[in-house]
Image (tube, rainbow, N blue to C red):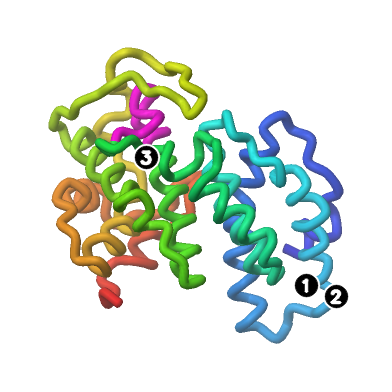
């Protein structure tokens, strides 16, 4: 963290919002732990890290990218920036965008009322990736006393069940996905690309909806059993089994 804080002055790659969204939350989770548990992180180094995330990262992701399927990745890091820096305004910006934003990443738009993911017609790798990002946002908000998991009648739970059902080999109903702008995207049938290759996303969703809330999540349970232990997931927060499996329900 110190090495990057005193070196990074800009991010210019065309996919820079994605890189901040997927990498930023990992830095911030680590920084939050170290800040509160390790006395060796000097104040000047903490300030340099904070300057980096507020002056280099945040301006890039502040406007979001509503037409971008990976907008959920942006929101998870923005929310974490707000927490680490004690900036309520930044946290609220991410929270409100997730709950009510005109965006592909808003929780009410990411999965439809049947649970079909916006990217189910693209491939199952991206469909699962979105579930992982959305559950990370919901868990972060939950730890701050806010319930995004329950938004839109547990919409994310339906998303987990829909994708898990298809991933384990059963058939699901599919309709061409229509964006919040009314545009039809992706093919007229669900994509089989990535089917059967389970990403490390199911433990967190199962822990909340089943263990905490007492909901039946039969397909998520089956998918979880096929992917446990969940290890590193590339763009996703890693080690989901370590953080979620077998924990008390409350």
Q: Is residue 78 left or right of residue 149?
A: right
Quick check: 84 left or right of 103?
A: right
Residue that lies at the very extreme toward the top in this rendered image:
188
Nearest to viewer (mark 3 / mark 2):
3
Tell me residue 203's x, y (percent).
30, 57
- Judged left or right of residue 224, residue 76 is right
Dot 3 corresponds to which residue?
Answer: 128
Tell me the CA gap for discs 1 and 2.
5 Å
- Give the residues drawn in magenta, as a range: 116-127
Question: Magenta segment, principal secondary structure?
Answer: loop
- Residue that mark 1 sits on: 46
- Residue at 26% x, 60% y is 209
Report x, y in % for residue 133: 47, 48
Q: Which is nearer the eye, 234 or 73?
A: 73
Q: Quadrant of residue 249?
A: bottom left
Do callouts 1 and 2 mark residues in contact (Cβ within 8 Å)?
Answer: yes
Q: Which residue is mark 2?
A: 44
Which disc, if any, is residue 57?
A: none
Q: Earlier in the sequence, mark 3 or mark 2?
A: 2
Q: Position of residue 15 (x, y in %)?
A: 67, 32
Image coordinates of residue 24 in percent, x first then y, are 64, 53
32 shown above or below 120: below
Which quarter shows the C terminus? bottom left
Q: Is residue 237 magenta?
A: no
């Amino acid at each position: 963290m110190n090495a990057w804080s005193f070196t990074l002055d800009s991010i210019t790659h065309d996919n820079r919002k994605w890189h901040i969204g997927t990498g930023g939350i990992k830095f911030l989770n680590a920084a939050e732990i170290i800040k509160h548990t390790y006395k060796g992180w000097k104040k000047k180094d903490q300030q340099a890290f904070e300057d980096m995330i507020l002056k280099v990262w945040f301006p890039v992701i502040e406007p979001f990218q509503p037409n971008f399927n990976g907008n959920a990745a942006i929101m998870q890091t923005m929310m974490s920036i707000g927490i680490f820096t004690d900036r309520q305004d930044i946290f609220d910006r991410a929270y409100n965008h997730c709950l009510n934003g005109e965006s592909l990443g808003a929780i009410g738009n990411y999965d439809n009322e049947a649970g079909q993911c916006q990217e189910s017609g693209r491939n199952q790798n991206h469909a699962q990736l979105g579930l992982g990002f959305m559950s990370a946002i919901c868990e972060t908000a939950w730890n701050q006393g806010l319930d995004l998991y329950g938004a839109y009648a547990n919409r994310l739970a339906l998303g987990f069940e829909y994708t898990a059902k298809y991933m384990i080999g059963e058939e699901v109903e599919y309709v061409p996905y229509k964006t919040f702008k009314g545009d039809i995207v992706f093919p007229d049938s669900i994509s089989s690309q990535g089917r059967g290759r389970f990403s490390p996303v199911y433990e967190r969703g199962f822990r909340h909806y089943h263990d905490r809330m007492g909901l039946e999540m039969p397909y998520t349970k089956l998918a979880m059993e096929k992917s446990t232990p969940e290890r590193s997931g590339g763009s996703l927060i890693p080690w989901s089994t370590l953080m979620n499996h077998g924990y008390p329900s409350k």
